Amino acid sequence: MSKHLYDATIMQLKGRALEAYAALDMLFSNPSVVPDHTAWSQEIIKHTTVLAEHENVMVTLQQYFGPRYSPPAPPHGPGPTRQAPPQEEPSPITPEMSSTLRREMEKNRSAKEGKE
């Protein structure tokens, strides 16, 4: 079995399982989608069976053939350390740029003048 065939099979199983899940979601949120109003339980059972079958087949394939076609798992433990990007020198903030700085400078100036 090639990796492409394995991936295609897994994708088909996922798609069919999602289709069954969507049908169940629709049935539970809007039961009127079933034309025969007495067959709700039967429709739910039918779609639940399809969902379970496709998920079970997918899990079985992944269990037996997944390790052969999946990329190796990253090693446990700390990975390679990343270096932090170099930080630029912060540009100085001038009173023209910050109204808060201007107010603080004026307060400090008036406090100094009051002490003299």
Image: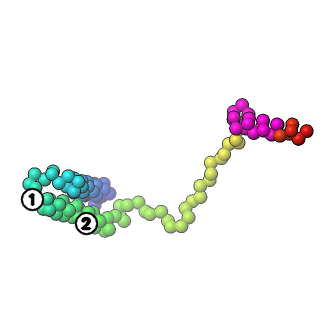
Disc 2 + disc 1, Cβ < 8 Å: no
Question: Disc number at residue 38?
Answer: 1
Residue 52, by quadrant, is bottom left
Residue 87 at what x, y percent from top left? 66, 45
Quadrant occupied by the N terminus: bottom left
Q: Which residues are magenta?
A: 93-110
- Is 80 left, or right, of 48 in this rendering? right
Quadrant occupied by the C terminus: top right
Render colour scheme: rainbow
Q: Is residue 42 magenta?
A: no
Q: Residue at point 70% right, 41% down?
A: 90
Between circles 2 and 1, the one closer to the viewer is: 1
Q: CA distance from mark 2 to mark 1?
A: 29 Å
In-front residue for pair 67/16: 16
Per the image, label 2 sits on a secondary structure element best described as helix
What's the residue type where badge 2 is placed?
Asn
| Residue 91 vertical position relative to residue 28 in the rendered view, above or below | above
- Which residue is most to the front? 114
- Which residue is most to the right? 116
Residue 59 at what x, y percent from top left? 29, 65
- Which residue is most to the top? 96
What's the residue type where badge 1 is placed?
Thr
Question: Disc number at residue 56?
Answer: 2
Q: Residue at point 26% right, 63% down?
A: 55
User: Tag count in the figure?
Assistant: 2
